[in-house]
Amino acid sequence: MDSCPSIKNILLLDSEGKRVAVKYYSDEWPTNSARETFEKAVFSKTQKSNARNEAEIAMFENNIVIYKFVQDLHFFVTGGEYENELILATVLQGFFDAVGLLLRGHVEKKEALENLDLILLCLDEIVDGGIVLETDGNVIAGKVATQSIDSSAPLSEQTISQALATAREHLTRSLLT
């Protein structure tokens, strides 16, 4: 058993069980089709629950799944069967809070897709290689917001929307001079 808590995946699905943003940290689902099958199965098992106010816990295929729904988005965090449920719930709450802050309270599919780069950065700030790095939603959102503002970063380190904004800025400057 590992001494550090380990996360197997973090899923953000829409109200139909389709992917919005997902990140896997385990080789338990090696192919994309295996991952999609897992996502559909977890969604179908949990969709009838009322996990709107507080996170719910379910055992699924020898995994602990903690989940919470808001509007048309379903948040999931999966850990091994011996993982601490409180740690998994804290990771879920941190992800949920950070997304809420970054989307300015408009936590719905349309806003999530428009700000997908920020949500993916959130996932990177929360977990790295399955190891939990941060669980405080304010800290996560702050780090993501700081990264998204830094236009002096090399293009290889910028998100697509940041790179497009930087390119637009350079093009505008070149046309004006």
Image: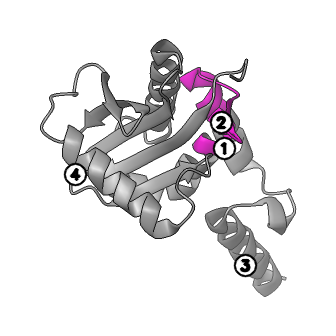
Task: Determine the residue positioned at 62% across, 46% down.
Answer: 25
Q: CA distance from mark 1 to mark 3?
A: 32 Å
Q: Which residue is mark 1?
A: 124
The verdict on residue 10 being magenta is: no
Q: CA distance from mark 2 to mark 4?
A: 24 Å
Marks 1,4: beta carbons within 8 A: no
Residue 42 position in % (x across, y down): 30, 45
Task: Determine the residue positioned at 22% across, 51% down.
Answer: 15
Give the magenta-colored segment's residue range. Answer: 123-142
Q: Which residue is mark 2?
A: 127
Q: Which residue is mark 4?
A: 15
Local crowd size for mark 2, using a 10 Å CA cut-off: few (<14), some (14–19), many (≥20): many
Q: As drawn, which residue projects farthest toward the left?
A: 48
Q: Secondary structure at mark 3?
A: helix
Mark 1 or 2: in front is: 2
Local crowd size for mark 3, using a 10 Å CA cut-off: few (<14), some (14–19), many (≥20): few
Dot placed on the residue nearer the N-terminal end, 2 or 4: 4
Indicate the quadrant where residue 89 lies: top left
Local crowd size for mark 4, using a 10 Å CA cut-off: few (<14), some (14–19), many (≥20): some
**In which quadrant will I find the N terminus?**
top right
**In which quadrant will I find the C terminus?**
bottom right
